[in-house]
């Protein structure tokens, strides 16, 4: 009875060991078979959802859908770069002037009395008691009398007197006496005690520099003026954008003081020195200001449109910037993408200007570029990470361990099992 129980026990142990050996061998065969299906004789993956060989990545339809891959074509189109910046209105320095006196004398009356008033060219601005002016008038009248008295004298005398009259008249003109006043003097033959000073220039009074009763000399400043019908805008342009700024470029200006209104100007000067603190360059824009709305020291916003001409462009999100390289993934087919280096120019309107590396009509990846690039870093079988085992549905993870984790087949039982293999 005891021998039967021992024999039955040995039989059970032998059958169990045989099942374990056969199961381990079958598992090993299945995993090795799946591996051979996933990789052909050239080493390329054939049935995996994601495959990467060097800079080439292949994604099946499900993988592309899960990654959100999108593409766009490289096209040639006119491109314009928009630069938005701020600036400050300044006076037009070429329109700044001084009104000065041409005679010496005492200022007895000022006709323009406050800063900010507007003076027109030729406008009377002051009355000056000037002995020099009185003497010039008397000299002119004296020459006129001599001409009248000696009109019947010899030809040479008459010619000399006419020259004296012309010289006296010229002296009054050099004192800035209008021709109308000289003609009036000829008819009345009466001198004036006060000389009226007329503005040589027009503009807005920035500073009144004399008061009534002041004694002035030739060349003394009476008023400081600025022509505010045109103003300058100094805008700050960052050094990365300065290459596109050229004289004559149009600029549109807006101000918070006048919502909904815009003002136009043109670039006239680019400062040759870069501000080391702000890393910007001052650009001067000349603007018409007939209504006087743009006032010096006013802060405004400036919008500069830089035409780049017809350029080969792709969406800027297509470009993967590694710091030392700029790469894109070019679609060779519906499911195959190849990494390629490109040289970019300006960025505008959501597009990147391509200087080299692409041809018109080529298709590039615009979304999921980083995910595709990560597959080239993982390599061939590393690209299966996150997709489960070979043959599994993308997005699911197989519970079957990798081939490297297949447990070794259990050792056969001792010699006492060998006799039961026939069973």
Image: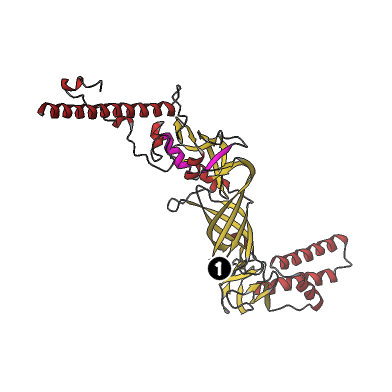
Q: Is 288 situated left or right of 83 in this image? A: right
Q: Is residue 32 above or below residue 375?
A: above
Q: Which residue is mark 1?
A: 256
The answer to whether residue 312 is above or below residue 5 is below
- Compared across the picture, whether 171 is left or right of 11 comes to right
- Residue at the extreme front: 1
Magenta span of residues:
362-376
Q: Position of residue 61 (x, y in %)?
A: 52, 39
Quarter holding the N terminus is top left
Between 327 and 232, which is closer to the camera in this rendering?
327
Q: Nearer the viewer, residue 279 or 380?
A: 380
Is residue 141 visible to us here? no
Above-or-below relation of 358 to 42: below
Q: Secondary structure at mark 1?
A: loop
Quadrant placement of the C terminus = top left
The image's colouring method is secondary structure
Which sits in the foreground, 79 or 317? 317
x then y, percent, for residue 141: 77, 73
Query: For residue 265, what is the image quadrant?
Result: bottom right
| Magenta residue check for 369 | yes
> Is residue 38 at all visible to an observer of this figure?
yes
Mark 1, other Cα within 10 Å: few <14 / some 14–19 / many ≥20:
few
Toward which corner of the image does residue 120 lie, by quadrant? Answer: bottom right
What residue lies at 39% left-to-right and 26% top-to-bottom? 33
Residue 235 vs residue 361: left or right?
Answer: left
Residue toward you, 22 or 168: 22
Is 319 left or right of 34, judged from the image as shown?
right
- On the image, which quarter does residue 146 sit in? bottom right
User: Residue 173: x, y in percent?
Assistant: 73, 66
């Amino acid at each position: 009875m005891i021998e039967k129980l021992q024999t039955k026990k040995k039989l059970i142990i032998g059958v169990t060991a045989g099942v374990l050996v056969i199961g381990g061998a079958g598992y090993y065969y299945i995993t090795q078979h799946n591996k051979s299906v996933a990789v052909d004789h050239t080493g390329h993956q054939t049935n995996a959802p994601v495959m990467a060989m060097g800079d080439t990545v292949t994604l099946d339809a499900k993988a592309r859908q899960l990654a959100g891959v999108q593409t766009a074509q490289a096209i040639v189109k006119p491109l314009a770069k928009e630069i938005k910046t701020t600036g400050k209105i300044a006076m037009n320095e070429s329109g700044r002037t001084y009104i000065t006196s041409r005679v010496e004398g005492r200022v007895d009356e000022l006709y323009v009395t406050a800063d900010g008033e507007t003076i027109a060219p030729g406008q009377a601005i002051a009355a000056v008691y000037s002995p020099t002016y009185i003497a010039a008038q008397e000299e002119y009248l004296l020459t006129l009398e001599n001409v009248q008295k000696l009109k019947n004298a010899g030809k040479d005398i008459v010619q000399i007197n006419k020259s004296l009259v012309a010289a006296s008249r010229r002296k009054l003109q050099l004192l800035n006496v209008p021709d109308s006043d000289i003609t009036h003097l000829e008819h009345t033959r009466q001198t004036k005690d006060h000389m009226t000073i007329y503005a040589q220039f027009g503009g807005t009074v920035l500073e009144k520099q004399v008061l009534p009763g002041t004694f002035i000399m030739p060349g003394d400043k009476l008023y400081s003026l600025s022509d505010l019908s045109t103003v300058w805008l100094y805008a700050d342009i960052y050094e990365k954008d300065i290459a596109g700024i050229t004289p004559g470029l149009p600029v549109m200006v807006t101000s918070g003081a006048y919502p909904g209104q815009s003002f136009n100007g043109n670039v006239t000067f680019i400062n040759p020195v870069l501000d080391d603190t702000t890393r910007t360059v001052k650009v001067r824009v000349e603007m018409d200001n007939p209504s006087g709305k743009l006032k010096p020291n006013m802060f405004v916003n400036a919008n500069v449109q830089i035409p780049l001409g017809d350029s080969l462009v792709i969406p800027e999100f297509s470009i993967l910037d590694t710091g030392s390289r700029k790469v894109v993934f070019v679609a060779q087919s519906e499911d195959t993408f190849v990494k390629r280096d490109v040289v970019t120019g300006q960025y505008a309107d959501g597009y990147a200007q391509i200087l080299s590396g692409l041809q018109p009509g080529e298709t590039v990846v615009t979304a999921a570029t980083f995910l595709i690039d990560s597959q080239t870093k993982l390599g061939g079988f590393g690209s299966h990470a996150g997709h489960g085992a070979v043959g599994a549905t993308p997005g699911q993870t197989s519970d079957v361990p990798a081939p490297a984790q297949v447990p070794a087949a259990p050792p056969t039982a001792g010699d006492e099992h060998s006799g039961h293999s026939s069973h």
